[in-house]
Amino acid sequence: MTMTDDRPNPLANFSGDLALVFPGQGSQFVGMGRTLTEQSVAARHVLEEADRVLGFSLSTLCFDGPAEELEDTYNSQPAILAVSVAALAALHERVAAEGISGGKLSPTLLAGHSLGEFTALVAADALAFADALCLVRERGRLMKEAGAERPGGMAAVLGLDDAVLAEVVAEAKGDDILVIANANCPGQTVISGELAPLERAVDLAKARGAKRVARLAITIASHSPLMAGASEHLRALIAEVPIQTPRVPVIANESGALMASVDDIRQELAHHVERPVNWTNTINVMTGAGVSTVIEVGPGQALTGLIKRIDRDVTTLRLEDFGLTAK
């Protein structure tokens, strides 16, 4: 498939700056990457490398499942990273072949949602793909162990004012652990923590007018202090991983600061798993810096929907707009 098959150049009227964003955990699905590797030699090479690095056929797990094994955080984290990097390779290949945007994508900013921040660092040439794969697989193992040692959970709260939700969390947690974990977009926030205060918060949020409150089907309280043990081990691992100055700045999940140096990256990753993700602020930082077009690169389309709820004026593109698919 080419851009000449009555398919318009998705960047034909491009103006302003371009950013790439990468999805996090929850975007995995059985079958992801299979068609992509049929469409792109570059994508196939990425997944072949992932299989070699990890010492088992991650690609087969992505293509054929079983779902329960793919959804295990120990596997889903490297799987999402690998398919996202494969999608990026395919995108660069397609852009070069079709002469889109002069044959080269030149983003001015990169960002990833939670796990996706590691993919963004690979895209920025700050982390080697092989190192990132091993790091996120260990990240998944440590998070799983932390969840077993200190059980918790997460819940998505829809349609409740931020200030009201902050009051709900403060009231529900008491002396326990409960935090706002993901500010995904206006009206969609995820809370995370111990089970008792989480249940209290679910009831309180409904009583205070939330349109919907849904417990997530996980027993891991990501982006909360319950991940402190995992975070401590990850810091030691990250200290040993080679990191380069990023070719393109990456927006930090919590602060929205632009990570433009090795020290910036190490400081961000040191506490990444226990600190919140402010995706709303991430997109606002992008648009404030002049970004007008954002391409979501990886499995799923969740980030595209969130971005539109944050800023309707942003042009959002997906792999399908370039004749590709993450399937």
Image (cartoon, rainbow, N blue to C red):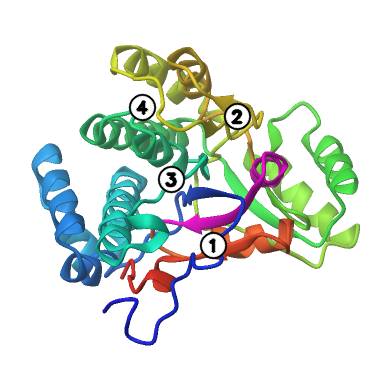
Q: Which residue is mark 3?
A: 106
Callout 2 secondary element: loop
Left or right of 188? Residue 273 is left
Residue closer to the observer: 1 or 84 = 1
Instruction: State the CA–CA distance, disc 3 to disc 2.
Output: 30 Å
Residue 284 forms part of the magenta stretch: yes
Q: Which residues are magenta?
A: 279-297
The answer to whether the residues at label 1 and label 3 have Cβ atoms under 8 Å apart is no
Question: Label 2 crowding class (10 Å Cα cut-off): few <14, some 14-19, many 20+?
Answer: many
Q: Is residue 65 visible?
A: no
Callout 3 secondary element: loop
Q: What label does residue 126 carry, if any?
A: 4
Task: Name the element at disc 1.
Answer: helix
Residue plotted at (34% across, 76% down): 3
- The quarter of the image holding the N terminus is bottom left
Which of pointers 3 and 2 lies earlier in the amino acid sequence?
3
Disc nearest the viewer among 1 and 3: 3
Amino acid type at circle 2 is: Arg
